[in-house]
Image: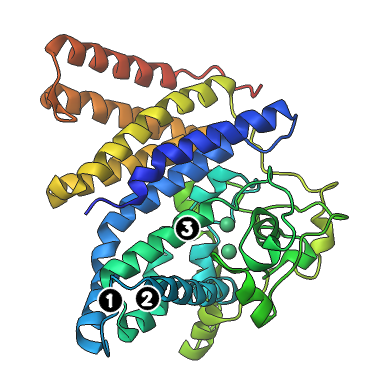
């Protein structure tokens, strides 16, 4: 089944474009091209990964529903739908809270918080590994008898709703900020200021935070600094998923017995800067900025447009692919995102990886005439092969090393 989120992708791009345009007109620096490309490519990789992992995560839900449910909620009942939405949001609150408070889960969720900007593209920066844990939190819904169809639909509604609060263009909304998750209270959630840490975990309702003591209102006297308390300082989508686990691995290697190791992985996550967060203020906080070469920024922007097309094509047709084809496309897209991130960081290995990727593309174009459901004319294929080889050659040149 095609992921329903795929149909929302054009809306995401339209609203990101609109938000960036309005911000530019108002003279606000809400966007950074490299950061936004990283956020969106992380989101694309997470959608691709979920085309594999949902077989497991949704599969467990369906098995739990089939064998453990007490009775089945009616799909025709409006109160049942409302209750399912509320129950999902309540369980999301606890999953999200645990994702911040337990190191093992924070290692997955930190991906969403790794951008130092807050805009609609940040909403797409979704973790690939979070779904390895989230399914367990929603099992009570299966046991309570919420049918899988109802569960999938309320989950999609909840996820789409969460896109909206990721903006700085909408100010405070009065009483609405105290009931629903809104831009104002979600800005607090993404902040690293003292008063923002471990606050406002709600998905649709912020009432849960008010009920369980984790609510904080946005302050007018202190600008919010966005990001994670330990900055990622990278555009590498894989490293965004591994950084904290690498830290935990190093820590646990220093301990001898199993229970001490376990404690490190399951410890209550404490923001490392909790005691010194004062340094995270708008005046002295510097965002990560490796000063990407201008032509590399343009190259990656053009490359990115192609990757979006490929990802959309892959996700819309994933059911028709053989497993080997799915794995091939996924690895190609992962490789593309990796080389893009490394090139945006001006890393030499990014260019090498890109050269390998371009050569793989030209070799595949040589032997495979069928692309995206069409048989490409030989002249077009030849043109594309020459273009990819030319780009690979161009990337090998050593000049253009000065950032502008
Ligand atoms: Zn969070
Ligand atoms: Zn968020």
Q: Give 320 or 156, whichever is nearer the viewer.
A: 156
400 lies left or right of 219: left
Upstream in sequence: badge 1 or badge 2: 1
- Is 119 in front, or is 321? 119
User: Disc 1 and disc 3: Cα gap in Å?
Assistant: 39 Å
Nearer-N-terminus badge (2/3)? 2
Place residue 307 in its image quadrant: top left
Can I make out residue 185 in this image? yes
Q: Is residue 403 above or below residue 285?
A: above
Q: Is residue 25 left or right of residue 381?
A: right
User: Which residue is nearer to you in this view: 367 or 166?
Assistant: 166
Expressed as whole percent of the image width and height from the top left, the position of residue 379 reads 16, 9
How many other residues sit within 10 Å of disc 1, few (<14), some (14-19) or many (≥20)? some
Where in the image, quadrant-wise, is ligand 1 located?
bottom right
Determine if the C-beta at disc 1 is less than 8 A from ligand 2: no
Q: Quadrant of the N terminus?
A: bottom left
Foreground: disc 2 or disc 3: 2
Q: Secondary structure at mark 1?
A: loop
Callout 1–callout 2 Cβ contact below 8 Å:
yes
Q: Which residue is mark 1?
A: 74
Kind of element beneath mark 2: helix
Q: Quadrant of the C terminus?
A: top right
Give x and y (percent) for residue 141. 36, 80
Q: CA distance from mark 1 to mark 2?
A: 7 Å
Among the two numbered marks 1 and 3 on one chain, the one whose residue lies closer to the N terminus: 1
Q: Position of residue 254 (x, y in %)?
A: 56, 78
Q: Nearer the viewer, residue 296 or 218?
A: 218
Looking at the image, what colour scheme do you see?
Answer: rainbow
- What residue is shown at x 39% (from left), y 59% (from top)? 156
- Check disc 3 and report the residue beneath it: 241
Residue named by callout 2: 80
Relative vertical location of residue 255 with respect to residue 25 in this rendering, above or below:
below
């Amino acid at each position: 089944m095609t992921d329903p989120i795929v149909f929302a992708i054009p809306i995401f791009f339209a609203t990101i474009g609109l938000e960036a345009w309005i911000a530019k007109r108002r003279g606000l620096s809400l966007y950074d091209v490299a950061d936004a490309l990283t956020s969106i490519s992380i989101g694309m990789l997470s959608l691709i990964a979920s085309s594999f992992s949902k077989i497991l995560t949704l599969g467990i839900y369906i098995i739990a529903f089939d064998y453990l449910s007490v009775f089945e909620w009616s799909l025709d009942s409006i109160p049942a739908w409302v209750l399912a939405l509320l129950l999902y949001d309540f369980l999301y609150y606890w999953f999200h809270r645990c994702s911040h408070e337990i190191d093992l889960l924070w290692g997955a969720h930190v991906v969403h918080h790794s951008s130092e900007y807050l805009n609609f593209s940040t909403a797409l920066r979704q973790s690939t590994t979070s779904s390895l844990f989230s399914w367990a939190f929603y099992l009570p819904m299966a046991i309570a008898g919420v049918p899988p169809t109802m569960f999938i639909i309320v989950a999609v509604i909840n996820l789409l709703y969460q896109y909206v609060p990721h903006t700085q263009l909408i100010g405070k909304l009065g009483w609405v900020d105290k009931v629903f998750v809104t831009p104002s209270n979600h800005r607090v959630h993404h902040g690293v200021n003292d008063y923002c840490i471990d606050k406002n975990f709600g998905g649709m309702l912020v009432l849960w935070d008010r009920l369980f003591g984790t609510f904080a209102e946005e302050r007018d006297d202190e600008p919010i600094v966005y990001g994670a308390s330990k900055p990622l300082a990278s555009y590498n989508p894989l490293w965004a998923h591994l950084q904290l686990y690498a830290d935990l691995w190093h820590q646990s290697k220093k301990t001898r017995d199993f229970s001490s190791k376990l404690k490190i992985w399951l410890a209550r996550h404490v923001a490392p800067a909790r005691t010194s967060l004062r340094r995270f203020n708008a005046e002295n906080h510097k965002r990560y900025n490796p000063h990407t070469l201008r032509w590399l920024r343009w190259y990656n922007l053009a490359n990115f447009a192609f990757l979006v097309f490929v990802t959309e094509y892959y996700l819309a047709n994933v059911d028709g692919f053989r497993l080997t084809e799915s794995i091939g496309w996924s690895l190609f897209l992962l490789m593309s995102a990796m080389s893009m991130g490394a090139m945006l960081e001006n890393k030499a290995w990014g260019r090498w990886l890109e050269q390998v990727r371009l050569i793989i593309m030209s070799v595949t174009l040589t032997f495979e005439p069928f692309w995206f459901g069409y048989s490409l004319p030989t002249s077009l294929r030849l043109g594309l092969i020459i273009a990819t080889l030319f780009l690979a050659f161009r990337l090998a040149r050593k000049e253009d090393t000065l950032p502008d």
